[in-house]
């Protein structure tokens, strides 16, 4: 795929190059150091690319000071404060993810959309990795839920468009066991222990959501937070969710980020799931994450279905 090049004036950079990494999802951005700040013209280009590609991967970066990362994300909207973040830190909107030898779990180690259990889940997330495992590993998978929706047969799409699902903080120990504090942290956690006495968010969202900026449709269920389909018997709802989760995890919808120190990823939670892989124990992986507040997910029945997908999915087992 041919990279897209834009003239730009950003500090020492003279050219911004945005290269798609797959026909379905994601683009790699070079020619820009986010730590130096982003002017209005460049931000406009990045925002358009963000909406088009769903995931932007920034290479050859230097460490962003926390205020710079916060200011950049704030240009996408008000910042989100995670319910598992320590309340006494200087930057409440910053989550420092650190998984190491003594971690009992690695948060997010499964397909999910960031805190979809909240009534107004985040719209966007920016992560800069500061420490990478010495022998590789710790990659992040991203999957496009617009493509997942577009490849369903029309009859199934029509049925799903009328359904809603319950999202809950069902896997509470995984949220912040590796964080330095936070209301869910319990150093003595045992797998069969009762949840801590804190408010665990729940919300009901459409199974198919409409993107508030592009108008495009995508599936909005994930195995980490979606616990049931409203209006269906438990068995029927479980079968439907299991089928959708298998479909959403197909490799045709995915890209894979192999992190280098100071790489940055910006992804659109309104259309993208992700899965950080924990394959580097006992080594450490650490990064700074900031999320942007989103709107309540909705489905617009007057919207249009996507055109036929370019993907050709084989239904047979190999």
Image (cartoon, rainbow, N blue to C red):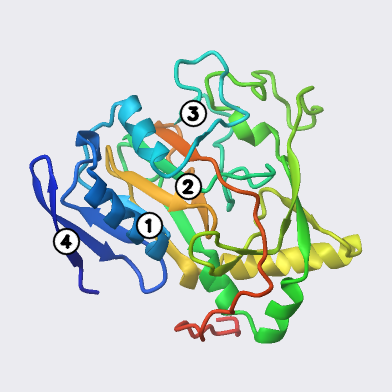
SS at mark 4 in the image: strand
Where residue 297 sits, quadrant-wise, is bottom right
SS at mark 1 in the image: helix
Nearest the eye: 205 or 59: 205
Asked if disc 4 and disc 3 are in contact, CB closer than 8 Å, the reply is no
Q: Position of residue 96 (x, y in %)?
A: 45, 28
| Residue located beneath label 3 in the image | 93
In this picture, residue 135 sits left or right of residue 238: left
Q: Earlier in the sequence, mark 1 or mark 4?
A: 4
Give the residue displayed 71% in from the left and 40% down from the top: 171
Q: Earlier in the sequence, mark 2 or mark 1?
A: 1
Q: Position of residue 115 (x, y in %)?
A: 62, 43
Give the residue displayed 91% in from the left and 63% down from the top: 233
Front of the two marks 4 and 3 = 4
Distance between mark 2 and mark 4 Cα atoms: 24 Å
Distance between mark 1 and mark 4 Cα atoms: 15 Å
Count residues near mark 3 (Cα–Cα under 10 Å), then give few for <14, some for 14-19, many for 20+. Answer: many
| Residue located beneath label 4 in the image | 6
Give the residue displayed 45% in from the left and 55% down from the top: 141
Give the residue displayed 46% in from the left and 65% down from the top: 254
Q: Earlier in the sequence, mark 2 or mark 3?
A: 3
Distance between mark 2 and mark 1 Cα atoms: 10 Å
Count residues near mark 4 (Cα–Cα under 10 Å), then give few for <14, some for 14-19, many for 20+. Answer: some
| Residue located beneath label 1 in the image | 50
Q: Earlier in the sequence, mark 3 or mark 1?
A: 1
Asked if disc 1 and disc 4 are in contact, CB closer than 8 Å, the reply is no
| Residue located beneath label 2 in the image | 124
Q: Quadrant of the C terminus?
A: bottom right
In this picture, residue 116 sits left or right of residue 138: right
Figure check: 121 above or below 3 = above
**Outermost residue toward the right?**
233
């Amino acid at each position: 795929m041919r990279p897209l090049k834009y003239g730009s004036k950003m500090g020492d950079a003279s050219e911004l190059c945005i290269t798609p990494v797959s026909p379905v999802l994601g683009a790699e951005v070079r020619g820009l150091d986010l730590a130096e700040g982003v002017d209005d013209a460049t931000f406009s280009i990045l925002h358009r690319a963000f909406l088009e590609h769903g995931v932007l991967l920034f290479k050859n970066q230097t460490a962003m000071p926390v205020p710079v990362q916060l200011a950049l994300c704030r240009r996408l909207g008000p910042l989100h404060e995670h319910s598992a973040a320590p309340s006494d830190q200087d930057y409440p909107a910053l989550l420092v993810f650190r998984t190491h030898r003594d971690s009992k779990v690695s948060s997010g180690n499964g397909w999910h959309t960031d805190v979809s259990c909240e009534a107004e889940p985040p719209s966007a997330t920016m992560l800069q990795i500061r420490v990478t495992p010495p022998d590789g590993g710790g990659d992040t998978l991203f999957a496009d839920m617009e493509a997942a929706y577009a490849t369903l047969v029309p009859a199934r799409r029509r049925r799903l468009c009328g359904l809603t699902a319950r999202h809950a903080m069902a896997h509470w120990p995984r949220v912040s066991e590796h964080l330095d504090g936070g209301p869910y942290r319990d150093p003595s956690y045992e797998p069969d222990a009762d949840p801590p006495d804190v408010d665990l968010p729940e919300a009901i969202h459409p199974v198919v959501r409409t993107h508030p900026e592009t108008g495009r449709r995508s599936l909005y269920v994930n195995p980490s937070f979606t616990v049931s389909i409203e209006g269906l018997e438990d068995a029927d709802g479980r079968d439907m969710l299991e089928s959708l989760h298998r479909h959403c995890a197909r490799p045709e919808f995915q890209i894979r980020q192999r992190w280098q120190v100071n790489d940055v990823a910006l992804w659109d939670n309104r259309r993208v799931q992700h899965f950080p892989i924990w394959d580097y124990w006992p080594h450490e992986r650490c990064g700074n994450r900031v999320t942007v507040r989103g709107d309540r997910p909705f489905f617009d029945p007057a919207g249009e279905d996507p055109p036929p997908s370019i993907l050709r999915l084989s239904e047979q087992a190999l």
